[in-house]
Amino acid sequence: MNKLFLTLNILLIVLLGILQAKESFYSTQSHPFLNIINGVSTECVMHKFYTSSGWTRIDGEVGRNGIDGLYYKKKDHIIKEVLVAESKWNTSRLGLSGKGKTVKQMSQEWVLRTLRRLQKYKPIPEYASILKLVKNGQYRARLFRMKPVGENGIQIIIYKIRNKGAKAFDKIMETKLHPININAPRNSFERGIIKTYNDCRKKYLHRYLPGISKSGIDRLMRDNYLQPGDICNVCQ
């Protein structure tokens, strides 16, 4: 009897240790993955927003580096309009690159550098036309920000980037949409945004955190902002 009791105690201790280790893993290791998931989901929504407005998307990245959103419009089979957009989740900021970190993300200099690198690694014909327009300053630049609002909302805010030479620019708020309740979108536009947002979040949750069950992911989809504590709750 004593041996059985001791064995059960050992098994209980081992089980508790496994559960604590699992919780610790998801609370610490999930954080960088959640940054990626939140960021990529914002990018997915941005693509949906602009392609639904008549823009054609073209690849703007080499690996994970480059332009989040590169779009164009043609007239008589010739590219006439170019849109360069960068997506940011919540309070994420534009970065710095180049030697000495002096080239600001979304400046004209940064856009030109990125396009030249794209031409080098991806021989896509449209890049030459896009580069020419950007050189001449004939393009639009936008910062597309999405942030959580309250417990159930997300909000899209778009800033116009107005160049001040090749290196500097001003950010001017252009569009501030009404917050969207992710659990109760009001119209077809909002439903499309939320579907895109959740489809992207599901895809990358499966990729980066495969231990989460389907029911756990369904619970997470009702949350507007994925954080490490949310992951712990669905993995218990």
Image (cartoon, helix red, strand yellow):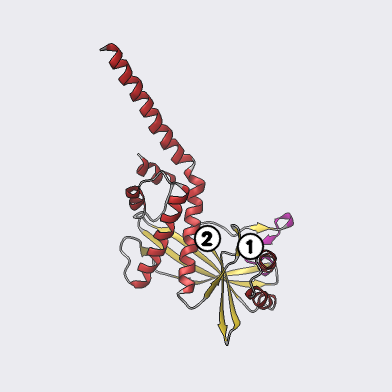
Task: Tell me where the magenta segment starts and ends, as one range.
Answer: 99-111
Q: Is residue 60 magenta?
A: no
Residue reaching furthest to the top: 2
What label sits on residue 105 in the rendered view?
1
Q: State which quadrant residue 24 falls in.
A: top left
Residue reaching furthest to the left: 1
Residue reaching furthest to the bottom: 76
Residue drawn at the location 49% of the way across and 68% of the way down: 47
Q: State which quadrant residue 76 falls in.
A: bottom right
Q: Is residue 49 visible?
A: yes
- Residue 196 in picture, x, y percent from top left: 41, 64
Judged from the image, the secondary structure of the residue bearing numbered disc 1 is: loop
- Residue 138 in picture, x, y percent from top left: 64, 79
Q: Is residue 155 above or below residue 188?
A: above
Image quarter of the N terminus = top left
Q: CA distance from mark 2 to mark 1?
A: 12 Å
Q: Is residue 102 magenta?
A: yes
Q: Specify few, some or many for label 1: CA neighbours under 10 Å numbering under 14, 14-19, or 20 or more.
A: many
Q: Amino acid at mark 1?
A: Gln
Q: State which quadrant residue 115 falls in.
A: bottom right
Which tag, 2 or 1, sits closer to the chain's start? Answer: 2
Q: Specify few, some or many for label 2: CA neighbours under 10 Å numbering under 14, 14-19, or 20 or more.
A: many
- Residue 54 in picture, x, y percent from top left: 48, 78
Residue drawn at the location 65% of the way across and 58% of the way down: 96
Residue drawn at the location 44% of the way across and 59% of the way down: 200
Q: Amino acid at mark 2?
A: Lys
Q: Seen in the image, is 45 located left or right of residue 107? A: left
Q: Is residue 33 above or below residue 153?
A: above
The residue to which callout 2 is attached is 88
Image quarter of the C terminus = top left
